[in-house]
Amino acid sequence: MSSFDNKFNHLKLPLIDIQTATNNFASENLIWRGGFGYVYQGQLLSSGNLIDIAARKLGGKLRYGIPEFQTEIMMLASLKHQNVVSIVGFCHEDEEKIIIYNYEAKESLEQYLSDPVTLTWTQRLQICLGIARALSYIHYDEGRDFSVIHRDIKSYKILLDVTWEAKLSGFELSRMQPAARRQGLVLDRPCGTPGYVDPAYEASATVNHKSDVYSLGMVLFEVLTGRKARIMEEGKPVFLARLARSHYEN
């Protein structure tokens, strides 16, 4: 048994339990399909109670390997905050890689960006504050001996609970470094989502917590303007950051 298995064995869940919870990953239970997995809603029997879950099913042709799978589990098992999504467990069985989270009733912030009726200005501001609190926690929390750089902040990875409280998710690309070196740069190939990635990170292949702050800024732009950071016009990608910069310079 590996050191990872030894440390996180208490979070393992049988595949049959996840299949039962999601009606064997039925299409009607599918709530999201993306580059890092398919997400299914379900109800899992845990300690005699049914809990609402979101099961992220990975593998196959998806761009998601063992390192990313284990990174997300390690991060979420270590990070406990009201504005960070909570892990329920994981399954690695019969070549299936599945991470199970608490289900957040309002799902992703992304779907509400252009909806001024459902998401009021007060709610938008509260969500922005929640995201900022999550970043402050993963970057600077004094109770931990390590700091976390998320590296893929975007509106899709901001989940909303039944009270519209923001929950940061998607830690598969994150990096950990000692708290004493949290201000230092980490040499790593650029990753993340076009439109949200810090240009300095892309240019230098070095990342630190300020790169997350840049990505947060792009999410704030989205929330304020009701437009996504990256849109398609005439078959070509248009980035909100470039439009904003052009407007400012003119």
Image: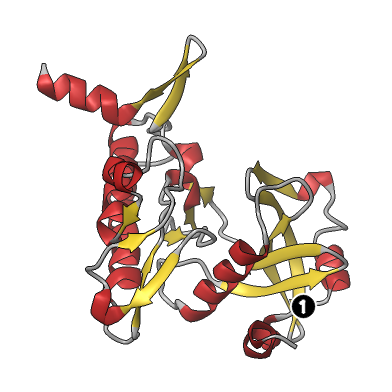
Q: Quadrant of residue 131?
A: bottom left
User: Is residue 146 rendered to the left or right of residue 245?
Assistant: right
Amino acid type, callout 1: Leu
| In the displayed structure image, the side of residue 169 where residue 10 appears, left or right | right
Q: Residue at x 37, y 43 (%)?
A: 197
In this rendering, the answer to whether 192 lies above or below 88 is above
Q: Number of marks in the image? A: 1
Residue 101, horizontal then vertical, whole percent: 62, 67
In the rendered image, is residue 30 in sight? yes
In the picture, which quadrant includes the C terminus? top left
Q: Residue shown at 49%/54% (left/top)?
A: 159
- Residue drawn at (47%, 40%), measured in percent from left and top? 110
The residue that appears at 32% across and 72% down in the rendered structure is 137
Residue 102 visible in the shown view: no
Q: Position of residue 18 (x, y in %)?
A: 80, 67
* Element type where label 1 sits in the image: loop
The outermost residue toward the top is: 234
Tell me the quarter of the picture where residue 120 sits.
Answer: top left
Question: In the rendering, at what x and y percent does residue 214 appear?
Answer: 27, 47
Q: In the rendered image, which quarter is residue 146 located in?
A: bottom left
Residue at numbered disc 1: 13
Q: Nearer the viewer, residue 19 or 149?
A: 149
